[in-house]
Image: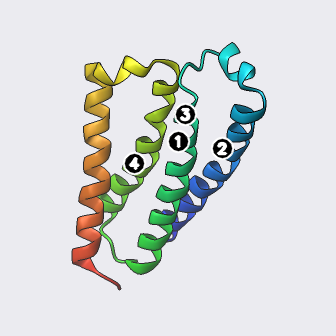
Amino acid sequence: MDWVVRIGLIELALGGLLGWAMVIRDEKPEWLRRIGVVAPQRIRQVHLDYVMMGLILIGVGLAVPDLPTAVAAALVFGTFVNPFLFVPLAFEPEVDKRLWYRALAVVSFLGVSGGLVVAAVVGPG
């Protein structure tokens, strides 16, 4: 599962880069307001979630190299989309009540939780 590890590293790098958004949030919050951010606390959530999801992919990719490709793809999808779901919330906190948002959240959560359960069952290679 080299590609899962590679995507995990990309997510980890993205989380690291989002640390700069944390600096902006603390040092220049007016910049965020200027682009429409009304819930700046969501920036911390997306930052930390990409770090965690990247680490999850790296761990699973290394520990379970024989994970079925479809399961790995669902896990990758979920670990990318879950953190990203905080971004629209930063601009519009009520977006989580919309059907498209809720549907995307359910699908991404299923990808992560289902993928991790299968990884646990398949076990180390």
Q: Is residue 29 above or below residue 11?
A: above
> Residue 41 — which label?
3
**Residue drawn at x 46%, y 64% as measured from the top left:** 57
> Residue 73 or 123: which is nearer the viewer?
123
Query: Element under label 2?
Result: helix
Camera-near label (3 vs 4) is 3
> To which residue does mark 2 refer?
18
The colour style of the image is: rainbow
Camera-near label (3 vs 2) is 3
Q: In screen coordinates, is 30 left or right of 115?
A: right
Whole-number angstrom distance, CA of label 3 to CA of label 1: 9 Å
Q: Is residue 30 above or below residue 46?
A: above
Disc 1 marks a residue whose amino acid type is: Val
Whole-percent x, y for residue 74 in the image:
32, 53
Query: Element under label 4?
Result: helix
Whole-percent x, y for residue 32 in the image:
68, 22
> To which residue does mark 4 refer?
77
Query: Element under label 3?
Result: helix
Disc 3 marks a residue whose amino acid type is: Gln
